[in-house]
Amino acid sequence: MSQAPTQYKDQKNYQIASAPDVEHLPKVKGWDFEKEFDFQQFIQQFATTGFQATHFVKAVEIVKQMQEEKEKCTIFLGYTSNMVTSGIRDIIKYLVKHKMVHVLVTTAGGVEEDIIKCLKPFAIGVFNVSGRSMYEKGINRTGNIFIPNDRYLYFEKFINPFLDKLYNEQKEKGIIHNPSEIARELGKEIANEQNNEDSILYWATKNDIPVFCPAVLDGSFGDLVYFMKQRYPDFKIEIAGDTKKIVDLGLNAEKSGAIILGAGVVKHTILNANIFRDGLDYAVYINTADEFDGSDSGAMTEEAITWGKIKTTAQHVKVHGDATILFPLLVAATFGKKQKAKSLKE
């Protein structure tokens, strides 16, 4: 019998890893339900469970390090619009309300659906339902969440006077707003008209936490901007200013960390902004995308290091999985625990 090779090689014979001394590695072991349940110990046992559970514990440890260095570590939280469609919105709101993160990056849906939920709620449905029957009843579906068309009528009624206000400021004061300024002004509108403390934008504005939305027109807000342009062809939204703002936040940070839920433009906006400071010091990805099509969405943290988006010395991990399951657990094991301890002291 031939001896097993000490090195693993790919099809072109490039060395990619050396076989470790297995006897000195942690042993696989799951949680023992015979003993008294303790949440923190339960999460820590994930470390020896294997697969994504082990990666998840690494994510917990990295976020704890960000927390410990909160005074000098700027934390970027990125999330795609489906996070706001879901109940993850409430968890993001919690973090923003208690100033546990410093910069938000989202997509158009992450802004508009935060507003819509202040006006009318969404409903839990099912995945397996006829698209035609839903369309005929005027109900949109995002996964197993149902969103009736009337939610967007309420949104249109809310947004059109807001766009008119932006246009008047453009004409009278020469102000052309960028997306982060629009997000801030929307937070003020929610406070003035709705006073809805369930809103992410409400707390972001109240706590002076910038909300960047590089794809602000990719949604219902963009549809309404289209009609605005029909009425006022010279209406403008400025985007260059936000590029400078987010890069400056990275450059001026003593250390920077990122928690990114999902991928796409949200993920790359945060990573690219940190290139200018030679990369993030901490990075946690949670998404379901694979790297094998070469997309940035699926790219691993090691790939980001090659571009200078994450430092070679950084603590980093990608957890493959559904953020609606993993992010609440992550917050419970990190930010949630901290806030509970603080409340008990007070």
Image (cartoon, helix red, strand yellow):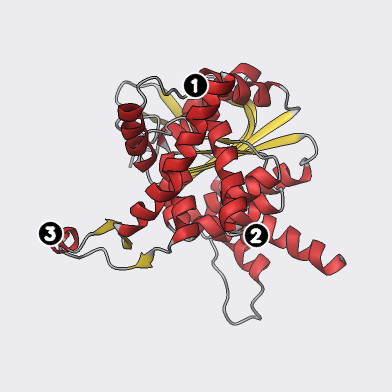
Q: Nearer the viewer, residue 278 or 129?
A: 129
Looking at the rendered structure, the secondary structure element under dot 1 is loop
Q: Is residue 18 visible?
A: no
Tell me residue 24's x, y (percent): 62, 49
Proximity of marks 1 and 3: CB atoms separated by less than 8 Å: no
Q: Residue furthest front?
A: 172
Vertically, is 301 above or below 33?
above
Q: Residue at x 35, y 40 (%)?
A: 219
Give the CA distance from mark 1 to mark 3. Answer: 39 Å
Nearer to us in this view, 51 or 186: 186
Q: Which mark is residue 68?
A: none
**Mark 1 neighbour density, 10 Å: few (under 14) some (14–19) many (20 or more):** few
Residue linked to disc 1 = 238
> Does 11 sit left or right of 177 as displayed?
left
Gap between marks 2 and 3, in whole Å?
42 Å
* Direction left: furthest residue: 132
Circle 3 residue: 132
Which residue is farthest right? 345
Name the kind of residue labelled 3 in the image. Answer: Arg
Three-letter amino acid code at the position of disc 2:
Ala
Mark 1 vs mark 3, foreground winner is 1
Residue 333, numbered circle: 2
Q: Are marks 2 and 3 in contact (CB under 8 Å)?
A: no
Gap between marks 2 and 1 measured at Cα: 39 Å
Residue at horizontal 19%, vertical 62%? 134
Counting other residues with Cα less than 10 Å from the Cα at mark 3, is it few (<14), some (14-19), or many (20 or more)? few
